[in-house]
Image (cartoon, helix red, strand yellow):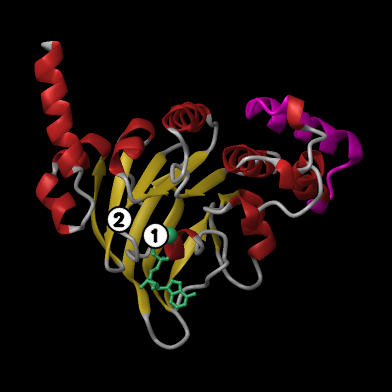
Amino acid sequence: MPLADSSTSLISIRGLSFAYPGGRTALDNITLDIPAGERLGIIGASGAGKSTFLLHLNGVHLPTSGEVIVAGTPVGPGTLRDVRSKVGIVFQNPDDQLFTPTVEEDVAFGPLNMGCPPQEVRDRVTEALSQMRLEEYRDRGTHELSHGEKRRVALATVLAMRPQVIGFDEPFANLDPGMVHQLIDVIRGLKATVIVISQEIIPVVACCDRIAVFHGGHLKAVGPALEIAANRPLLAECGIDFHYQGEIWRKLAAVSGD
Ligand SMILES: Nc1ncnc2c1ncn2[C@@H]1O[C@H](COP(=O)(O)OP(=O)(O)O)[C@@H](O)[C@H]1O
Ligand SMILES: [Mg+2]
């Protein structure tokens, strides 16, 4: 996929800086363009500014300076409803996303809130549950699900809104390896522009076209996923190298003769 420029981008971030109340600068002059249909990974160590960045895409945070433009609309106090219908965010903790008694009610909440007619709400719920292979969970109580199941329901609540852009905050954290694999397949199959935030580069390489590296609130680098993953000095500088895994892969390759 060609690297983006602002004339073709679905999301355009221009000189974005953000400080939390109290003055701590979390993002410093970030400029980044994301074309429609791209799967962009954002990697960085804890505290790099990844979640703060993601929360600017649907206006939970508004820039201290600079601007964020989604599908031609600048994100601001007057455009939040429009922007939130275009950008869905899957939070790191599913308990922040799920708040009604049953799976079905949680998945129906977004479409109902958007004013969809009853039949369309039912269709959207059925489709989102089916996409996440959750048909059997429709009537289950959300509170009784495992963490991994809640994560799938949280994604279904976002899919039911049919957003143009889906942002995931640390989707691979606390998942078993089989679930990581399943989620990578789901992300690859999404017909949306996707942004995946992670402290770990390996699953991001598996599902993203391009990767941006954040460090201390700065955008340190952006490029094709494999090129970024191959830049071990950059990863080490930003505290996200896969030191011990590289060593293990070399040993495994030697044992299996690959
Ligand atoms: N609610 C908050 N109030 C003040 N500072 C915050 C808040 N949330 C995050 N920060 C600070 O902003 C910086 C970036 O945090 P965050 O975006 O959560 O990083 P990441 O998601 O990459 O771990 C960190 O220094 C963090 O301590
Ligand atoms: Mg975070």
The residue at 67%/58% (across/down) is: 82
Q: Nearer the viewer, residue 41 or 11?
A: 41
Residue of label 1: 50
* Vertical position of residue 241 compared to residue 202: above or below: below
Marker disc for residue 44: 2
Counting from the top left corner in percent of width and height, residue 84 is at 64, 56
Check disc 1: other Cα within 10 Å, few if <14, some if 14-19, many if 20+.
Answer: many
Quarter of the image with the C terminus is: top left
The residue at 52%/72% (across/down) is: 62
Label 2 near ligand 1 (CB < 8 Å): yes
Q: Which mark is first along the chain, 1 or 2? A: 2
- In the image, the segment drawn in magenta is 113-135
Q: The residue under label 2 is which amino acid type?
A: Gly
Label 1 near ligand 1 (CB < 8 Å): yes
Q: Does the magenta stretch include residue 146?
A: no
The residue at 47%/58% (across/down) is: 54
Q: In which quarter of the image is residue 157?
A: top right
Give SS at disc 1: helix
Check if mark 2's residue and mark 1's residue have beta carbons within 8 Å.
yes
Check disc 2: other Cα within 10 Å, few if <14, some if 14-19, many if 20+.
Answer: many
